[in-house]
Image: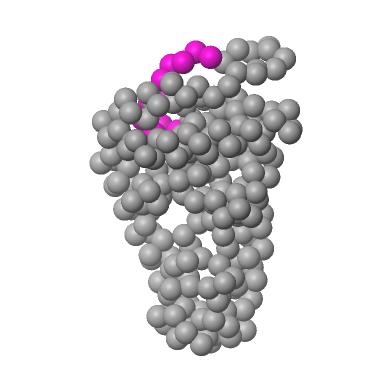
């Protein structure tokens, strides 16, 4: 359920997401320009209100879990002299590597960071995490379609399950993975097989997009 909800929340372009994928953020009025350093800690009370004061409140167990993840990120940022209000892409990329290493790179973890980034109006944080999730399901779909169209033997020569990129992998590294997979496809599969698989993947991805957009509209 959490994975589906996370996919639904992040199907649009960054500009569309800002307007439609989250409940309107509370006007907390906490940003102060010109300050040398914002040492304000996580606003747990305000965040909880943000998650519950909506048409479809976030379940209590998810609130607890996502709050812990934001606290973990807050603690992680201290080594860089950053706060939740000043965190941006460089810190997010480092943190996601840490999450991957710990096996905590789940949709729940990333939705926690995006929601909190949006809540405090730190769009650098918000968009940096969304970038990690862009196209996250494509390689899994490709793995499935390869098995369906060309069989498990060719699939495992092209994209074995243990080589699927982890959730949260930075975009620069995802590009390299995609290039390597396409090279293997051209080497292992016939041109017709490549075309059939890629057309099916594109069609499935398009269906995901429509479903996510519809889910967002229904959950607002």
Is 204 displayed left or right of 182 in the figure?
Answer: left
In the foreground, 50 or 25: 50
- Span of residues in magenta: 18-30
Residue 164 percent across, percent down from the top left: 55, 67
Q: Is residue 24 above or below residue 131?
A: above
Residue 143, compared with residue 90, is above or below; it is below
Q: Is residue 15 visible?
A: no
Q: In the rendering, at what x and y percent does residue 133 appear?
A: 52, 50
Q: Quadrant of residue 26?
A: top left
Taking the image as shown, residue 179 lies to the left or right of residue 153, namely right
The answer, for residue 23, to whether it is visible in the render is yes
Residue 67 magenta-drawn?
no
User: Does 49 sit left or right of 185 as displayed?
Assistant: left
Q: Identify whether 123 is placed above or below 192.
A: above
Q: Quadrant of the C terminus?
A: top left
Magenta segment main secondary structure:
loop
Residue located 49% across and 51% down the image:
106
Question: For the point 56% across and 75% down, which residue is it?
Answer: 159
Q: Is residue 26 magenta?
A: yes
Q: Position of residue 190 (x, y in %)?
A: 53, 87
Task: Give the colouring mode of the picture.
Answer: one colour
Q: Where in the figure is residue 186, as x and y percent of width and height?
A: 60, 80
Please report the residue visible at 60 percent of the width from the left and 49 percent of the height from the top.
Answer: 99
| Quarter of image, res 56 | top left
| Occupied quadrant, residue 169 | bottom right
Closer to the camera, 205 or 117?
117
Vertical placement of residue 153 versus 90, above or below = below
Q: How many marks?
A: 0
The residue sitting at 49% across, 31% down in the picture is: 116
């Amino acid at each position: 359920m959490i994975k589906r909800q996370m996919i639904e929340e992040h199907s649009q372009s960054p500009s569309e997401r800002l307007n439609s994928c989250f409940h309107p953020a509370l006007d907390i009025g906490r940003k102060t320009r010109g300050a040398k350093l914002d040492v304000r800690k996580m606003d747990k009370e305000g965040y909880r209100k943000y998650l519950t004061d909506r048409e479809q409140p976030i379940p209590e167990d998810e609130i607890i879990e996502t709050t812990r993840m934001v606290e973990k990120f807050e603690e992680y940022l201290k080594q860089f002299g950053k706060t939740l209000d000043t965190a941006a892409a460089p810190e997010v990329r480092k943190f996601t590597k840490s999450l991957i290493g710990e096996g905590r790179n789940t949709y729940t973890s990333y939705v926690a960071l995006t929601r909190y980034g949006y809540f405090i109006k730190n769009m650098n944080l918000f968009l940096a995490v969304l970038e990690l999730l862009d196209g996250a399901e494509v390689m899994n779909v490709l793995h499935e379609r390869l098995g369906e169209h060309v069989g498990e033997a060719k699939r495992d020569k092209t994209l074995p399950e243990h080589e699927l990129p982890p959730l949260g992998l930075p975009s620069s590294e995802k590009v390299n993975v995609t290039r390597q997979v396409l090279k293997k496809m051209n080497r292992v599969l016939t041109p017709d097989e490549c075309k059939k698989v890629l057309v099916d993947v594109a069609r499935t991805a398009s269906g995901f997009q429509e479903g996510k957009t519809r889910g967002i509209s229904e959950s607002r």
